[in-house]
Image (tube, rainbow, N blue to C red):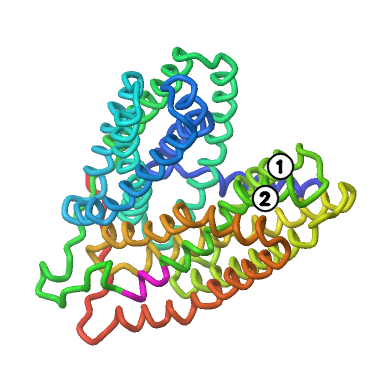
Amino acid sequence: MVGDRLKSAVKTWSSELIPGAGAARQLAVLTIVQSIGYGLFLTSSAIFFKQTIGLTTTQVGLGLSIAGLAGLLFTVPIGRLADRLGARPPLLACYLALVALFACYCTVHGFTGFVVVASLISVCETSVTPLRAALTYELFPPEDRVKVSAQMRSLLNVGFMIGAAGAGVALTVGNRAAFAAVVLVSALGHAVCAAIVWRLPRQTRIVPPTATGGPRPRAGLRDLRFLGLALLAGILEFFQPILTVALPLWIATRTHAPDFVNAAVLTLDTILVIAFQVAASRGAETATGAARILTRSGLALALACLVFATSQGAGATLAVPLLLLGTVVLVVGELSQAAGSWGLALHLPPPGRQGEYQGVFALGRGLQQTIGPFVVTFLAVGLGWSGWLVLAGLLALAGLACPPLTRAAQRAMTPAGTLPEAEAIPTA
């Protein structure tokens, strides 16, 4: 009896993780291919930039910061283009551009060329995420959009692990030929992604309200409620630099845990995200539900910070279980942040403005990418347990602020005369 229940539970879990036939499965293949390339390139690129292009550590950091800023500057304009043309054409253009740009790394020999190529790649890569979200909005009915997004995130982690393993092989070789192989494989992966996007179903473009004589929705950057939610989601996404920047430094400098614990923490996080992201997304099918899930995220992340703080100065016997327990709680916050963010970003934009608003929401992610590593490192590693307490308070407040701000955004969206949300209809 117990065996049958376990078998049934595993079957249900696997059926939810694997997307259904059609567009969802095509996007699944795209996600795995793209994330393998990301894992391969991101895990090895910083070392290759230094060893084969001849950049200093400072030049690598400065160049990537410039590239990241360039990417953020173009997310909203490219999102507006998606609203005019549909998400598919600009997404296809980004993937095709990435094929050529990654190949260009083979010809880079100095800092200026590195900054130019890295910045152009950042513009395309940063735009891919909101464009894929807009495409998900176009391809699937409201009840399926968050679930499909969750499936993609689980598969993204699978692909990233495969790519990271390949990066280990390339770094072992460690010469310019290995770097060329890495960037050319990444280019090939984006060519496959472009082919998949080309084969996806065409969509009937969602007509903005102004085209039908309705009231003109405000520009995404002037919608302060939505922008505020994007920034709150960006603060909750500090789980990323906590996991990848603050924790490794914390383990090395503030605990007596062995070095392998950092790898164990990252592995545990990846496995739990793959296994439970789809389940954690339940309830985010409405904006109200998504906001509640973001509150759960903030509280879970705050609790994780408190658990990590208790490991300060602890010996290995106590520090290791505390760090692993804190990671499990952190994953609860991470899964909830992802699901709640998808819910708000998919449900709150006005009709015909999905691409622009997805671009605006990506600015919150940019907040995490630009200042997140500094904030979490200064607070947690620099100040110790008291810094963890401040960080916990910040994350809890960000989560608690999401429901009232979401209600305000919903009220602003539904004045008298506002048109109901239009749906894109797949066409042949």
Residue 211 relative to residue 353: left or right: left
| Magenta stretch contains residue 225 | yes
State yes or no: residue 101 in magenta: no
| Front residue (pair 154, 244) | 244
The amino acid beneath tag 2 is: Leu
Circles 1 and 2: CB atoms closer than 8 Å: yes
Q: Nearer the viewer, residue 68 or 155?
A: 68
Q: Viewer-proximal residue, 70 or 185?
A: 70
Q: Residue furthest right?
A: 317
Give the percent coordinates (x, y) of residue 128: 34, 45
Q: How many marks?
A: 2
Residue 210 is left or right of residue 385, and the answer is left
Instruction: Give the residue displayed 16% in from the left and 55% down from the top.
Output: 84
1 or 2: tag closer to the N-terminus: 2
Task: Name the kind of residue labelled 1 in the image.
Answer: Asn
Residue annotated with mark 1: 262
CA–CA distance in space, label 1 to label 2: 8 Å
Quadrant holding the C terminus: top left
- Magenta stretch in the rendered image: 224-229
Which residue is at 45% across, 27% downward? 49
Q: Is residue 132 left or right of residue 311?
A: left
User: In which quarter of the view is residue 63 placed?
Assistant: top left
Residue 2, visible in the rendered structure: no
- Residue 122, x across and y down, in percent: 34, 41
Identify the secondary structure beneath mark 2: helix
Magenta segment main secondary structure: helix
Q: Residues within 10 Å of mark 2 (few under 14, many from 20)?
A: many
Q: Identify the residue at horizontal 26%, vertical 85% (top origin).
A: 415
State whether residue 296 appears in this view.
yes
How far from the left and from the top, in percent, is residue 50? Answer: 48, 26
Q: Which residue is mark 2?
A: 247
Against 157, is 43 above or below? above
